[in-house]
Image (cartoon, rainbow, N blue to C red):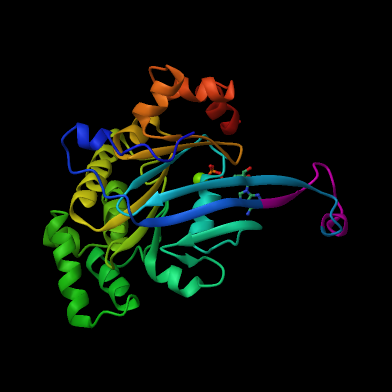
């Protein structure tokens, strides 16, 4: 597992300059998060709190770091611990052990500083669905401490960039496509900068066209913003397309971490699916299907 290879694939593709790697955005060292679940069939709540429960190691001794302006992918099947890691990064959960810092700030000791630097967008972006995109963005701007005037300007600029016509910008958000809602959510997360944007399965459940749209938007954001992005997905093509480096997670552990090209090269595989199989002995299709049961 290598954490030091250069960010090659974007540069090779001539899409943009390789991101400079001096500044570390996230430092995650030996982090663990354990959940407790009642033992199947157990009826006693008292027993649960007495410790008679099953431990789930959602994040199991995970270490990695992410550079500023990098798109870092967390690729794993359902239940592998991706969202738990995102929640730890966004201070919604505390690690049980290990250390986690965001731009040098500890997620436990300097929670407020961390919260000012991060933004999370999950599968179901949280909005006031009866309000319009414009109103939602203006509201967010006020939360981020902007003046009403600055908020309005910023919101209009974002909607303009998303190519949203006035009638769409003024309609309730619930009337927009889910793809467009996701784009508004990502744009909202980028209202402050420099930012660490946590995209938790931003394209899951979208139709192929909306999915492509959102992916293109993420690419556009990366070329125009001073943002660092963590993106979770169980879509291998998406990880390969968008991410500078990919951490493959299985059962709460990182089993590999590198650029997609390097991961394939290291195990002599043609696809990330095969990389996963070689490293875990499990087929991606089977793991995904198991989780759906
Ligand atoms: P992913 O996002 O990769 O699908 P999650 O991080 O949501 O995975 O979950 C990892 C594991 O932790 C799963 O086994 C899940 O059931 C468990 N888990 C997640 N959140 C909780 C919770 N609040 N309480 C108990 N178990 C949880
Ligand atoms: Mg998840």
Instruction: Give the mark count.
Output: 0
How far from the left and from the top, in percent, is residue 154?
Answer: 18, 70
State whether residue 153 is above or below residue 222.
Answer: below
Residue 266 drawn at (x, y percent): 43, 23
> What are the residue bounds of the magenta stretch?
34-48
Residue 182 in percent (x, y) is at 31, 52
Q: Nearer the viewer, residue 74 or 18?
A: 18
From what the image shows, is residue 44 above or below residue 142? above
Relative depth, front residue between 248 and 209: 248
Visible residue check, residue 240: yes
Q: Residue at x 58, y 33 (%)?
A: 291
Left or right, residue 219 beside residue 278: left
Q: Is residue 161 left or right of residue 219?
A: left
In the displayed structure, would residue 170 be above or below residue 245? Answer: below
Residue 67: percent from left, percent from top: 36, 51
> At 29% from the left edge and 46% from the top edge, which residue is drawn?
179
Q: Foreground residue, 122 or 206?
A: 122
């Amino acid at each position: 597992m290598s954490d030091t290879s250069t960010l090659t694939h974007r540069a090779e593709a001539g899409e943009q300059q390789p991101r400079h790697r001096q500044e570390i955005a996230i430092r995650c060292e030996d982090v663990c998060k354990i959940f407790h679940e009642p033992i199947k069939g157990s009826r006693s709540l008292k027993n649960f709190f007495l410790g008679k429960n099953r431990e789930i190691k959602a994040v199991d001794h995970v270490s990695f770091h992410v550079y500023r302006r990098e798109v870092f992918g967390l690729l794993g099947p359902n239940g592998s611990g991706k969202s738990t890691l995102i929640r730890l990064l966004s201070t919604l959960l505390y690690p049980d052990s290990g250390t986690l810092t965001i731009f040098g700030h500890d997620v436990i000791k300097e929670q407020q500083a961390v919260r000012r630097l991060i933004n999370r967008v999950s599968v179901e972006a949280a909005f006031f669905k009866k309000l319009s995109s414009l109103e939602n963005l203006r509201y967010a701007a006020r939360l981020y401490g902007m003046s009403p005037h600055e908020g309005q300007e910023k919101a209009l600029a974002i909607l303009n960039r998303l190519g949203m016509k006035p009638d769409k910008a003024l309609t309730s958000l619930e009337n927009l496509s889910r793809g467009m809602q996701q784009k508004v959510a990502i744009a909202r997360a980028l209202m402050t900068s420099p930012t660490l944007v946590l995209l938790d399965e931003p394209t899951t459940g979208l139709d192929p066209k909306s999915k492509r749209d959102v992916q293109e938007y993420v690419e556009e954001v990366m070329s125009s913003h001073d943002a660092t992005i963590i993106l979770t997905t169980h879509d291998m093509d998406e990880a390969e397309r968008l991410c500078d480096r990919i951490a493959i997670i299985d059962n709460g552990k990182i089993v590999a971490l590198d650029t997609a090209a390097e991961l394939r090269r290291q195990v002599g595989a043609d696809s990330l699916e095969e990389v996963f199989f070689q490293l875990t002995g499990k087929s991606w299709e089977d793991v995904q299907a198991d989780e759906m049961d």
